[in-house]
Image (tube, rainbow, N blue to C red):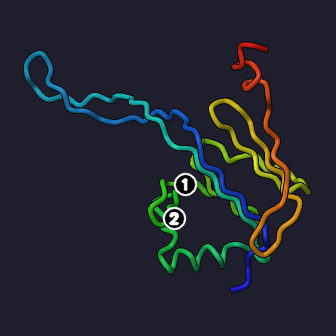
Amino acid sequence: MAIWAGDFCFEEGGYYLVSEKYIETELNENFEPTQVEKTRYKNVPRYSLMFTTTKSADQFLKRLLRKGILTKEGELYRFLFSPQLKLNLQENKVVFYSTTYPPETLKSQRNEIKWSFKGTQFEFQIDSLSQERVFGSLDIPMEKILSSISFL
C-alpha cells in the first residue's frame, strides 16, 4: 500500500497533569457505606505522532485497525502497547496525541530536530543524507556551560 506522503514527526517527553473523577465507597458515622465522588490527579506522559498520506488517511487507519496494530477504545486509540491517544484527522494529515489539545504544527522547509535536556534546548539541522549517514549541524547553547565554569 503506497500511501505515506513522507512527512513524519514523533514527539515524546514531559508530563501533563490531568484530573480524574471517581466514586469511592466510604463508611459514614453510622458505619453505613456511602458513595462519595472524589477527584484525583495524575501525571500522563506526553506523546504525539503526526504523519501525512498521499490519499485520504481513512483507508490507512482502517487497515491498521483490521490488522490489530491500532485499536480503538471509545474515542481513544492505542498503537499496540502505547498509552491511549486522541486522534485529530484532517484529510491526509493524521495526528495522534496524549495531551488535552493537539500539538501545533508549523510549516517549514527545514529538516530539523529540536529537543530539551535538563532545561537546555538543542537543535540539529539536517543538511544532507547518504545511505548510512546524516550530515548536519548541531546548535548547543553555551549559557549553562559557561555559567558552570567558575573561573571565567
Query: On the rendered structure, is 117 left or right of 145?
Result: left
Q: Quadrant of the C terminus?
A: top right
Q: Are marks 1 and 2 in contact (CB under 8 Å)?
A: yes
Q: Nearer the viewer, mark 1 or mark 2?
A: 2
Disc 1 marks a residue whose amino acid type is Leu
Q: Hey, which residue is sitting farthest right in the picture?
A: 109
Q: Give the image quarter of residue 56.
A: bottom right
Q: Quadrant of the N terminus?
A: bottom right
Give 54 or 116, whichever is nearer the viewer. 116
Disc 2 marks a residue whose amino acid type is Phe
Residue 35: x and y in percent read 23, 31
The label shown at residue 85 is 1
In the rendered image, the vertical position of residue 40 relative to residue 70, given as above or below? above
Q: CA distance from mark 1 to mark 2?
A: 9 Å
Q: Secondary structure at mark 1?
A: loop
Q: Is residue 140 visible?
A: yes
Q: Residue at x 79, y 73 (%)?
A: 5
Question: What residue does disc 2 label?
Answer: 79
Query: On the rendered structure, is 17 left or right of 30?
Result: right
In the rendered image, the vertical position of residue 88 relative to residue 36, given as above or below? below
Residue 97: x and y in percent read 61, 52
